Amino acid sequence: MKLIRWATVVLVMPLMGMAIVSSPSRAASSPAQDAAVTYKAKCAACHGAKAEKSFDPAKADADLLVAVLNGVKPKMPGFERSLGADTCKALLTQMRDLRK
């Protein structure tokens, strides 16, 4: 029984250490990168790859933010609960950048 425990420690523990050391560390992403990823996942299907559909960048930031947070009936859901205000602001910046 002691031999089995010793073999487990000798063989398995180094492998666990290798897995921890060799696993890639996740680099911190910037808010702009996060907004780009979120836009592609949640917005691009309706607004287009370049935010060319149903988005007026000439509107005031406050009006656009209210639309993103609360939604625009009947088509667009509100994202306040799922994304939060800061992410929604970053999305608006992303959409404006896409239109440039």
Image (spheres, rainbow, N blue to C red):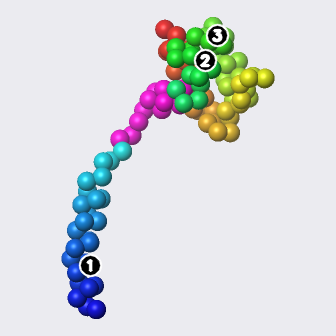
The kind of secondary structure the magenta stretch mainly shows is helix
Residue topped by disc 2: 47
Q: In 3D space, how far apart are the residues under numbered discs 1 and 2 (Cα atoms)?
A: 56 Å
Query: Could you tell me how many numbered marks the image carries?
Result: 3
Toward the viewer: 31 or 45? 45
Toward the viewer: 62 or 91? 91
Question: Does 28 sit above or below residue 96?
Answer: below
Question: Does 36 sit above or below residue 28?
Answer: above
Residue topped by disc 3: 56
| Image location of residue 36, percent across then percent down | 48, 26
Q: Secondary structure at mark 1?
A: helix
Amino acid marked by disc 3? Asp
Q: Residues within 10 Å of mark 1 (few under 14, many from 20)?
A: few
Q: Is residue 23 left or right of residue 60?
A: left
Amino acid marked by disc 1? Thr
Q: Is residue 99 left or right of residue 83?
A: left
Residue 93 visible? The answer is no
Between disc 2 and disc 3, whose residue precedes?
Answer: 2
> What's drawn in magenta, residue-wise?
27-39
Question: Which image quadrant: the N terminus?
Answer: bottom left
Residue topped by disc 1: 8
Q: Quadrant of residue 45?
A: top right
Q: Quadrant of residue 16?
A: bottom left
Q: Is residue 5 left or right of residue 34?
A: left
Question: Which residue sits at x=36%, y=45%?
Answer: 26
Q: In 3D space, how far apart are the residues under numbered discs 1 and 3 (Cα atoms)?
A: 63 Å
